[in-house]
Image (cartoon, helix red, strand yellow):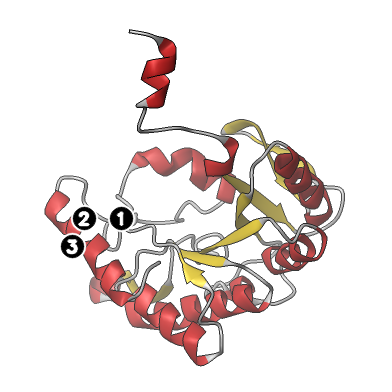
Amino acid sequence: RSPVLRAMVRETRLAPTDFIYPLFVRQGKGIRAEIGSMPEQFHLSPDMLVEEVGAAREDGVRAVLLFGIPDAKDALGSEAWNDAAGVQRLCRQIKAELPKVLVITDVCLCEYTEHGHCGTLTDGQNGCKDVDNDLTLESLAKTALSHARSGADIVAPSAMMDGQVGAIRSALDAAGFARTAILSYAVKFASSMYGPFRDAAQSAPKFGDRRTYQMDYRSPSQAFAEASADLAQGAD
């Protein structure tokens, strides 16, 4: 009957220490460009982002999730595993200046590929391009390793390739990064709900869609199977 009693038996509590702050990293200095689809959210250069992360830490937010916006894109998305790219530089800066902040990095290729798909394209049937799952796994593993070398505490593969968690876990362990954790997105549905994010990450596909590798939201049993597979492959 009282607010105090209700608070004592409350099962869910939200506090700044529960939050993860998503941030979009651009190369350069002094960049603070508002994202059209996300008012009051910005693309920031590493120098500006360190200040932003520090301010968030003062407010009690202890974890950040970094997305990279490269200056140049190519067919493979090779900037994703460039140790000198924006995400990697920011990881090193945060760990040097704000070592108690937990750094999570998004591991995907859509922000880095010129075609906007989450993986490597090969020629498919009827002249169409297909995302090659196994070739993409190699690129995702290289990206995760680059992030781990730069100081990331957790890597978060979001490309929705079959076997991505297992490939990344194997690569990290073999390179001596057994303590780098993997945050599984588990299930990403092929949905228009990602529209604002794709604008923010400049990652909308230039042709087709992502239905061949993201989940059909009308098939929940497949979604549970996908999540179970990530657990079996070593997701933390």
- How far apart are the two marked residues, 1 and 2, measured between alpha carbons? 6 Å
Which label's residue is closer to the chain start, 1 or 3? 1
At x 54% / y 81%, what residue is drawn?
A: 142
Residue 141, position in %: x, y? 48, 80
Q: Are marks 2 and 3 in contact (CB under 8 Å)?
A: yes
Which residue ends up furthest to the bottom in the rendered image?
A: 174
- As helix, strand or loop, the secondary structure at mark 1 comes to loop
117 or 233, nearer to the observer = 233
Write down the residue under mark 1.
187
Evaluate if marks 1 and 2 touch, with contact meaning CB atoms under 8 Å apart: yes
- Dot 1, crowdedness within 10 Å: few (<14), some or many (≥20)? many
Look at label 2 and name its amino acid. Ala
Q: Report whether residue 127 is seen.
A: yes
Q: Quadrant of the C terminus?
A: bottom left
Q: Which residue is mark 3?
A: 225
Is residue 19 shown to the viewer in this render? no
Above-or-below relation of 85 to 47: below
Residue occupying the point 52% across, 42% down: 18
In the rendered image, which residue does mark 2 sit on? Answer: 223
Looking at the rendered structure, the kind of residue marked 3 is Ala
Residue 132, image x, y percentages: 35, 77
If you read the primary sequence from the N terminus, does the residue marked by circle 1 or circle 2 appear first?
1
Q: In the figure, is residue 45 to the left or right of 144?
A: right
Classify mark 3: helix, strand or loop.
Answer: helix
Q: Nearer the viewer, residue 102 or 220?
A: 102
**Quick one: which residue is furthest to the right in this view?**
30
